[in-house]
Image: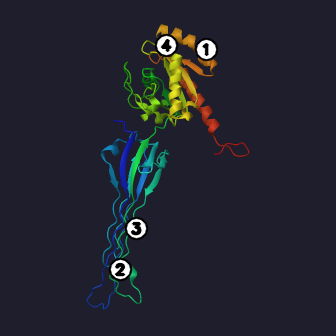
Amino acid sequence: MKFVDQVLIEVRSGDGGRGCVSFRREKFVALGGPNGGDGGRGGDVYFVVDPSLSTLLDFRYQRHHRAQNGAPGLGKDMHGKGGDDLFLHVPPGTLVFDDETGEQMLDLTATDDQVLFLSGGMGGRGNARFATSTNRAPRHAQPGIAGEVRQVRLELKLLADVGLIGLPNAGKSTLISVISAAKPKISDYPFTTLVPNLGVVDLGARTMVVADIPGLIEGASEGLGLGTRFLRHVERTDLFLHLIDLSMLQKGDPLENFELINRELERYDPALASKPQLVVFTKIDIPEVLEQAVQLKDHFIAQGHEVFLISAVSREGVKDLVQAAASRLAELRADQTPVVDDGRPLL
């Protein structure tokens, strides 16, 4: 399935139906009076969070979305039918922005959440509503009120617990394919990963969602390479696994590369650089890589980082890394749990 994470659409709620001008015309009913019914209310527009979706692809091919208009009123005091509501299904993590002002209107994260976005127009009143003791035969009715119209930008930010970051070819796609059922494209050329991939890691009693983010390069925060397009997908993660490749495929000094990635995160959003990271040396099934990783390990430990040496191909060290990530997540979530004054966690 093609990954689409930004779309511009027009959303319109239904117009209210017009009221009816009508009079009773039975043969033996003198001065029967008005009996025009009211118009129906226009349909509302709702956004619905659908966990089965992972992309905004459907909105790319249909840019205009409109709820049904209310039906007009009829004679014999028959009111028009209300228009059907429109339900727009979006994946978890979708943001809704007003395209004209740039204002964020909705942040849709809760599974199966349903949020009213635009209200339908009220139906017009029929002439039966305007009969009075001094005006027993009103010949006017109200038009329906038009629905609301908005040009909105939908932007998807993936919801994941752990984000895999690093330079291109650091081994992120291979790792996520090993620890989850995700099947990303894997090859030995730059920018194999062109879209984020989500994988669900089975931890037994619970699960952990991991996001494989396309490789970052110097200047990514300014739009170079794949640029900022996918950096927003790591904003919601709680923990980073910073993968470092010491093989011949990766050029440059590994320490400088590590700092380069963190600088790009900070330039994009300082909050990203402050997120906890586990340093992961990959491809240690290659003897030269293992030797270099052992030499560099102490440097990162001295900086306060927890360091892991893994090979996604041979699975060496992978289980320990997953368990450590799960434990660190549990600690972070415990720290985020709100407490009341007596120190007990809120239920």
Q: CA distance from mark 4 to mark 1?
A: 16 Å
> Residue 249: horizontal and vertical position, in percent?
42, 15
Identify the residue at horizontal 25%, vertical 89% (top origin): 27
Q: Quadrant of residue 323?
A: top right
Q: Earlier in the sequence, mark 4 or mark 2?
A: 2
Foreground mark, 4 or 1, reads 1
> Residue 278: horizontal and vertical position, in percent?
56, 24
Residue under pointer 3: 122
Q: Earlier in the sequence, mark 3 or mark 4?
A: 3
Residue under pointer 1: 298
Instruction: State the scheme by which the image is colored.
Output: rainbow
Foreground mark, 3 or 4, reads 3
Q: CA distance from mark 1 to mark 2?
A: 85 Å
Q: Earlier in the sequence, mark 1 or mark 2?
A: 2
Residue under pointer 4: 284
Residue under pointer 2: 127
